[in-house]
Every structure is written in structure tokens, then in C-alpha cells.
């Protein structure tokens, strides 16, 4: 039998039901794995072994009585440290957040995990307030990549991606404001889904407004569908929530036969994609064709919206830091302080012009999806680069958005988008293929991702770090 840390949530639940092992066994294995990998990749802000084992023992009792609680009873999980989890501080990677306080409230998605019996292992790392596409912060340092700790895990959900890849919990919840689930999932060789905006309720709301989504980070698409069913429940604290993701798990078996899929290898030549990435993505597209999808190479009209995205993103940073005085600002990540300075100088008219650009992009993508059920692109044009840097050395990029042209546009349009591992480059680093659907088509995205897993096209060697 595979080590318990290698099992998916579905496999763990099946083992509990059969009595092959218990939630206590799985939790102890995950905690032991954390002890080994944490010094190497720094994926965790906090680990609470005593609490986790207490929850696991309670779960084992329920399974023994034949009375499991919800859909995830006894499954070890982690939570990105931007999301509230009662019983401990949510520090958001910032020296400006005090550990003092009651910390007595769960974020909506965390509350749903708790209601379904999940076992909380700990909180995972994030850059300060989740502001960039790599994971390092003044408070918690640098998070490394499971395949090579000298490389970045990506971000801003880098700790969650590393934890899942290394078997430190089968499931994690991340957040994604410009690619922050998909970037690290791609770099770390795991599955990540940014659902349709509003599908997973958020509270408190993100300082970056309606760009930010919460979603699953898992070992495969089936686990993500299960987790999405759990965390997409309604919550009155988020006025924009859409309600549960009904029917997602049931749709997985439908496959991709007959789906109309547009394949855009480089957004019409706008993006320079590394050859190894382009080849791996093309193979994944070929697998979808073999499974019965209709593939057409077609580019959406994405005339790069980075300036509009920057206006929205930097303005959010400025609003976030507005209450901070000079001494607090000195403690910030210098990059965050810089973009907030830019954001503070935008006028209301410039902000509204960016909103107009965003709405126009949403309309263009809506029209595009009248012809295509899905759009497929590389998740990123590159693989993981040196840890501790916002951009690759000698790339000429100033900000993280320079190397993430395939991710942030779909935060602007609020579409569901997932990344699926599809190969390794010559350095043994993971490559991801991105599947994008029209708004509300989360089930279609997950169907296609699941088909890639079922076909073997998403199978890549796992990290060998510390025997994982």
C-alpha cells in the first residue's frame, strides 16, 4: 500500500470506511511528514499537532461508530494564512499583524471544512497580504519548491501548493487574485482551481476586491470537486456568493467527448513560451483530442490588460495600507510598499477606466465562449525560478505580472480556471496546462481536468525531497 501521505482524500476516506487505517494514522503520518519537509521548504506558518490529533481521534470515533460527519471526516487539510481559522492568529505574512486578539471566527470556507469533519494540520505561508506571485514575506521568510528548494514555490498560495505536493495534508484552500492558486500549483506539480468568482464565499473580503477568489489545491481533480462541493456553501457574510456548486462531482464522469476546445499556445504570439512548456502543453491538448474533444487553435482577443489590472491591484494595495503610519510602512515588503505608492496616485477616473477595460474584456471572453466550451493555454510560460525573487533574473520584468500573462486576465473576467500538471522540463521542474471555462462552468473545467488525470496525461513524477 502507498504511504498514507501519498493518498488522495478519496483514498483516505475509502480506507477509513474499510477500516484499513484511521484518521489518527493519517494525521500522524502527515505531521511526521511536516517535521521532515518544513525545514527544507518552509511551507507552514503554524502547525498545531495537539489540536490535529484531537480532531483525528474524534473522527476515528465517528468512523468506528459508522457515523462519519460530512464529506471530509478525518481528512488532513491545510489553510492558507490569509483565511481566518478560529483558535489561532491569521498573520497574513506581515509584521504589522498582531498575534493578540480573540481569533474566534472562521472564514466561510474554513467553517465548511470544520462542519465536514476535516482535520486541521496548520496554516500555510503567503507573501505579505498575498500581493505577489511568489511566496516570501518579511514575517515568515521564503518558501521553496518541493522539486528544488532553491527555486520558488510560486505564490501567493505557495505554502499550500508545497504542502499538498509533499504529502503534508491531502487538501488545502488557497486564494487567487491574479493566479495565486494556479501559479504555485503549476510550479509545484499539483492541481489548482480558481472557481467562478463568488462560488466560494469570502470573508473578510479581499483588499483586492472582486479579483480575488478562494479555491481548492489538491492532488487531482476529483479531490478538488469534492472540496469545492464542501466549501461552496452559502454564507451571509459574503453578499456576492453564488451558492453551492451543485452537480460538480456527478459531472466528472462525462468526460470531454464532443466538447469544443480552443487551444491558444501563446495568445497569438504575444507571449514567449519556453519550448519545454510549449511541448508539454501541446501533448496535453493532444490527449484531449484523443479523448474525443474537438480542438481548434484559436486565440481570444486578450490585448494585454496588464495596465488595467495594475490599476485595480495597486489601488487595492493602497487602500489596504491607507491606515498605516511611517513606522508600520517600514516593516512592509518593499515591493508591496512600492505598488501601494503607485496605487495611491491613481485618480477615481483612472480607476473607473480600468473597470471599463475589465468589463470589456469580460464581454469579449463571453462572446468567445459562445463558440468554445473551454480555452486551453499554458498555465505559465516558464517553470520555477530562483526562490526569494519576484521575477526571474535577467528577465527584464519589473513585476510578477510580467511572467504570468496567462493567469491574471481571468481574474478580471471572473471565469473558472484550473491548472493540471502535464510534464517536467529538463531540470525536472513541473509544467502546467490551464483549462478555462465561461463563468459558472466550473463543472466543465473539472470534467476536462479529470479526463486528463484518468487518461494518465496528468501523471508526473512526484518530488523526491526528503523521501516524499
Image: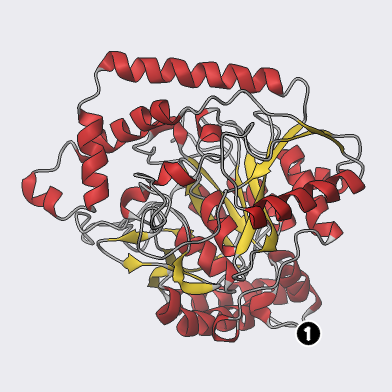
Name above or below for residue 290 compared with residue 18. above
The residue wearing badge 1 is 1
Name above or below for residue 281 compared with residue 33. above
Alpha-carbon neighbours of circle 1 within 10 Å: few (<14), some, or many (≥20)?
Answer: few
Q: Is label 1 in a helix, a strand or a loop?
A: loop
- Which of the two residues, 19 or 295, is positioned nearer the viewer here? 295
The answer to whether residue 275 is seen in the rendering is yes
The quarter of the picture where residue 20 lies is: bottom right
- Which of the two residues, 311 or 428, is positioned nearer the viewer here? 428
Toward the left, the furthest residue is: 326
Q: Residue at coordinates 57% horizontally, 48% vertically from top-left?
A: 381
Left or right for 434, reference 412: right
Q: Residue at coordinates 57% horizontally, 21% vertically from top-left?
A: 362
Q: Find residue 234 and report its horizontal and vertical position in percent.
A: 56, 37
- Which of the two residues, 34 or 120, is positioned nearer the viewer here? 34
Q: Find residue 167 and report its horizontal and vertical position in percent.
A: 59, 74
Name above or below for residue 219 compared with residue 262. below
Q: Find residue 35 and report its horizontal and vertical position in percent.
A: 46, 84
Picture quarter with the C terminus: bottom right
The answer to whether residue 190 is seen in the rendering is no
- Which of the two residues, 378 or 134, is positioned nearer the viewer here? 378
**Callout count:** 1
Left or right for 340, reference 12: left
Q: Find residue 454 and report its horizontal and vertical position in percent.
A: 84, 58
Q: Residue at coordinates 52% horizontally, 69% vertically from top-left?
A: 163
Q: How is the image coloured?
A: secondary structure
Amino acid at each position: 500500500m502507498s504511504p498514507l501521505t501519498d493518498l488522495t482524500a478519496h483514498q483516505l476516506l475509502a480506507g477509513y470506511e474499510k477500516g484499513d487505517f484511521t484518521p489518527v494514522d493519517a494525521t500522524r503520518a502527515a505531521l511526521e511528514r511536516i517535521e521532515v519537509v518544513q525545514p527544507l521548504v518552509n511551507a507552514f506558518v503554524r502547525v498545531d499537532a495537539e489540536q490535529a490529533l484531537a480532531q483525528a481521534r474524534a473522527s476515528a470515533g465517528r468512523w468506528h461508530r459508522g457515523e462519519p460527519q460530512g464529506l471530509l471526516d478525518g481528512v488532513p487539510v491545510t489553510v492558507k494564512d490569509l483565511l481566518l481559522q478560529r483558535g489561532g492568529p491569521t498573520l497574513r505574512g506581515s509584521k504589522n499583524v498582531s498575534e493578540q486578539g480573540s481569533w474566534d471566527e472562521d472564514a466561510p470556507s474554513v467553517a465548511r471544512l470544520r462542519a465536514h469533519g476535516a482535520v486541521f494540520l496548520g496554516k500555510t505561508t503567503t507573501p505579505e497580504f498575498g500581493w505577489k506571485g511568489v511566496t516570501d514575506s518579511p514575517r515568515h521568510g521564503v518558501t521553496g519548491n518541493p522539486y528544488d528548494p532553491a527555486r520558488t514555490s510560486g505564490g501567493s498560495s505557495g505554502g499550500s501548493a508545497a504542502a499538498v505536493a509533499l504529502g503534508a495534508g491531502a487538501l488545502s484552500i488557497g486564494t487567487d487574485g491574479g493566479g495565486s492558486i494556479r501559479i504555485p500549483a503549476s510550479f509545484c506539480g499539483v492541481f489548482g482551481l480558481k472557481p467562478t468568482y463568488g462560488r466560494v464565499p469570502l470573508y473578510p473580503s479581499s483588499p483586492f476586491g472582486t479579483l480575488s477568489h478562494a479555491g481548492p489545491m489538491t492532488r487531482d481533480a476529483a479531490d478538488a470537486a469534492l472540496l469545492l462541493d464542501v466549501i461552496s456553501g452559502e454564507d451571509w457574510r459574503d453578499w456576492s456568493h453564488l451558492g453551492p456548486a451543485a452537480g460538480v462531482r456527478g459531472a466528472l464522469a462525462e468526460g470531454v467527448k464532443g466538447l469544443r476546445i480552443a487551444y491558444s499556445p501563446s495568445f497569438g504570439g504575444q507571449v514567449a513560451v519556453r519550448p519545454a512548456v510549449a511541448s508539454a502543453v501541446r501533448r496535453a491538448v493532444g490527449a484531449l483530442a484523443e479523448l474525443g474533444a474537438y480542438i481548434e487553435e484559436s486565440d481570444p482577443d486578450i490585448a494585454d490588460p496588464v495596465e488595467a489590472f495594475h490599476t485595480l491591484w495597486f489601488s487595492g494595495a493602497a487602500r489596504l495600507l491607507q491606515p498605516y503610519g511611517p513606522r508600520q510602512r517600514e516593516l512592509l515588503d518593499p515591493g508591496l510598499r512600492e505598488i501601494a505608492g503607485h496605487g495611491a496616485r491613481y485618480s477615481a477616473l483612472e480607476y473607473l477606466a480600468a473597470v471599463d477595460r475589465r468589463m470589456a474584456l469580460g464581454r469579449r471572453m463571453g462572446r468567445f465562449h459562445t463558440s468554445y466550451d473551454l480555452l486551453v493555454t499554458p498555465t505559465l510560460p516558464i517553470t520555477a525560478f530562483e526562490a526569494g525573487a519576484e521575477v526571474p533574473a535577467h528577465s527584464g520584468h519589473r513585476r510578477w505580472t510580467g511572467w504570468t500573462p496567462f493567469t491574471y486576465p481571468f481574474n478580471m473576467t471572473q471565469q473558472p480556471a484550473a491548472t493540471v500538471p502535464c510534464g517536467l522540463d529538463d531540470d525536472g521542474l513541473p509544467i502546467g496546462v490551464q483549462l478555462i471555462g465561461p463563468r459558472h462552468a466550473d463543472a466543465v473545467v473539472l470534467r476536462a481536468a479529470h479526463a486528463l488525470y484518468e487518461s494518465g496525461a496528468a501523471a508526473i513524477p512526484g518530488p523526491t525531497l526528503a523521501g516524499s
